Image (cartoon, grey):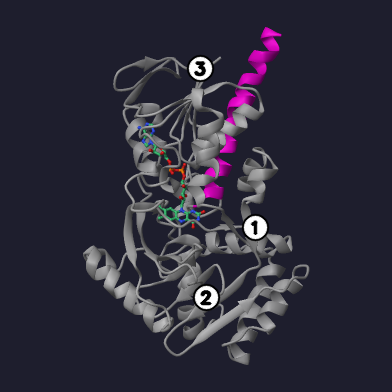
Amino acid sequence: MSVAIIGGGWAGLATAVELHRHNIPFTLYEATDTLGGRARRLDDSPWPLDCGHHLMLGAYHNVQRLLASFGKKETRRLKRHLLRLDIRGKSQRITIQIANVSPPLHLFLGLLRAQGLTMHERGTILRLTARLARNQFEINEDVPLAEWLRQQGQTRNLIDFLWRPLCLAAMSTPIENASSKIFIHVLKECFAHAREDSDILLFDGGISQALPRLVQQRFASSIQYQQPLQAFTVERNRINTLHFLDKTVQPQHVILATPASISQQLLSPHDTLRPVCQQIANIDYQPICTVYLKYPPHITLATPMIGLVGGLCQWAYDQQQGHIAVVIRGPGAHTAMEDGKLFNEVSRELHGHFPRWPAPSAWHIVREQNATFNCRSGVAQYRPQTDTPIDNLWLAGDYLDTGYPACVEGAAISGIRSAQAVIRALAPQSAASA
Ligand SMILES: Cc1cc2nc3c(=O)[nH]c(=O)nc-3n(C[C@H](O)[C@H](O)[C@H](O)COP(=O)(O)OP(=O)(O)OC[C@H]3O[C@@H](n4cnc5c(N)ncnc54)[C@H](O)[C@@H]3O)c2cc1C
């Protein structure tokens, strides 16, 4: 028996851990010399940095289960913070602190005590959340989020100052295009069940030090680096041979855990896979730019993240020891700016919000062009399922139909599902050989 996993991002890594849990051997083929994909550690940064600051939520149960399978020590490295939204503009500041009580009171109390919102605005959000809860967080039509919020009576100020930054943080997609259904799914997962689901989770040392490092250490002999899959051949509706640059492999089962655009290229030569290719072809990507800044170690934010409105900066994240990451999601004026100018603009804006901070002593900018799939309204119809028309081929990746936007939880869910599909496919064979 042999299972080939193609791609060592969170989807491929989750597949590997789930297969191992069922004692199924695998070989993971990764195109580069690092695991982690879009959540990898950079190899050319002036100090240890990931390719983007990754925020996780208490609702990411699959991520937490995967990490727990590596022992208590690793679970302890996942630091939990009670959700506190702090969003600042030039002349307005909103703070909402989730109360440490059971749902739905945690949210209602948090909203009642929110600062920087008028009574009317608090009432509008409370009525909206009560309506969503009554409807089990389901809506019929996937209209763009800004339009849906207007239909729900949200004021322009609330949309610009609260919902826009939240939408960018959760979906990396501008609110004018973003899928209201997927945004509401995130709200449901965070607020409708346990109080802890709304927590902010941060892994010590960054996301690359979570699953990517752990899989690399535990499964070193099952991983092959610098092995980009070039093509595969199909015979009698089964993948027969995988073609790499300098070798071929004949696995029994294949999980393709590559980003949508690569999967599409690899699937497109095969007639039976044309419908899934046409579906995936509609998925496009959004950029994320991260400006890493180094201040003296005593510089810190009051919360793990602070929203910034009215300039280029969208969210500032505290990475401890004076390290601040400013994240700019989606397209915008920054994409045309050269790095030095962008750094000047970002540090000038930060100085406006935090006038006592000294100038940063170092900085580094990371621009990921294809950071997250465009989570626009209607995108759900283009997100494929795990199964394919080829008997021994399954798909994994954050772009699959998980209900989540592009995130490590979505990637983990897709990876676990693909592993379970292989386990199901192997079950009759194991029974026959027993
Ligand atoms: C800057 C940035 C910030 C982000 N912020 C957050 C956040 O705060 N919270 C959050 O949850 N998510 C965040 N994300 C999204 C998250 O990183 C992704 O959703 C997730 O990592 C996707 O995992 P994946 O396995 O589906 O795909 P990928 O990570 O893209 O992995 C695919 C892997 O396949 C490999 N590969 C490609 N082609 C081949 C081939 N032919 N053969 C073999 N291997 C191949 C690639 O090298 C890669 O390792 C962010 C992403 C970025 C870029």
Task: Give the spatial CA distance, label 1 vs label 2.
Answer: 25 Å
Image quarter (top left, top right, bottom left or bottom right) of the C terminus: top right
Instruction: State which quarter of the image contains the N terminus.
Output: top right
**Label 1, residues with CA under 10 Å away: few <14, some 14-19, many ≥20:** many
Residue under the image location 36 percent in, 49 percent down: 282
Query: What type is the residue that disc 3 sits on?
Result: Gln
The residue positioned 61% from the left and 64% from the top of the image is: 187
**Does label 3 or label 2 sit earlier along the sequence?**
2
Looking at the image, do the residues carrying marks 1 and 2 touch, with CB atoms under 8 Å apart?
no
Q: Hey, what amino acid is under mark 2?
A: Leu
Of marks 3 and 2, the one in the foreground = 3
- x, y (%) of residue 66? 63, 41
Q: Which mark is residue 356?
A: none
Pair 1/3: label in front: 1
**Magenta region:** 407-434
Label 3: how many residues lie within 10 Å, few (<14), some (14-19) or many (20+)?
some
Task: Give the prevailing secondary structure in the magenta stretch.
Answer: helix
Tell me what residue is drawn at x 50 percent, y 35 percent: 12
Distance between mark 1 and mark 3 Cα atoms: 37 Å
Q: Height in image: 25 above or below 410?
A: above
Residue 433: in magenta span? yes
Return the disc, 1 or 2, that comes first in the chain's sequence. Answer: 1
Label 3 and label 2: CA atoms lie apart by 49 Å
* Residue 130 seen anywhere in this rendered image of the structure: yes
Are the residues at dot 1 and dot 3 in contact (C-beta closer than 8 Å)? Answer: no
Q: Name the spot of residue 155 as percent of width and height, x first.
A: 51, 85
Closer to the chain start, of discs 1 and 3, is 1
> Looking at numbered disc 1 in the image, what kind of residue is underneath it?
Gly
Residue corresponding to mark 3 = 252
Q: Which residue is mark 2?
A: 149
Q: Residues within 10 Å of mark 2 (few under 14, many from 20)?
A: some
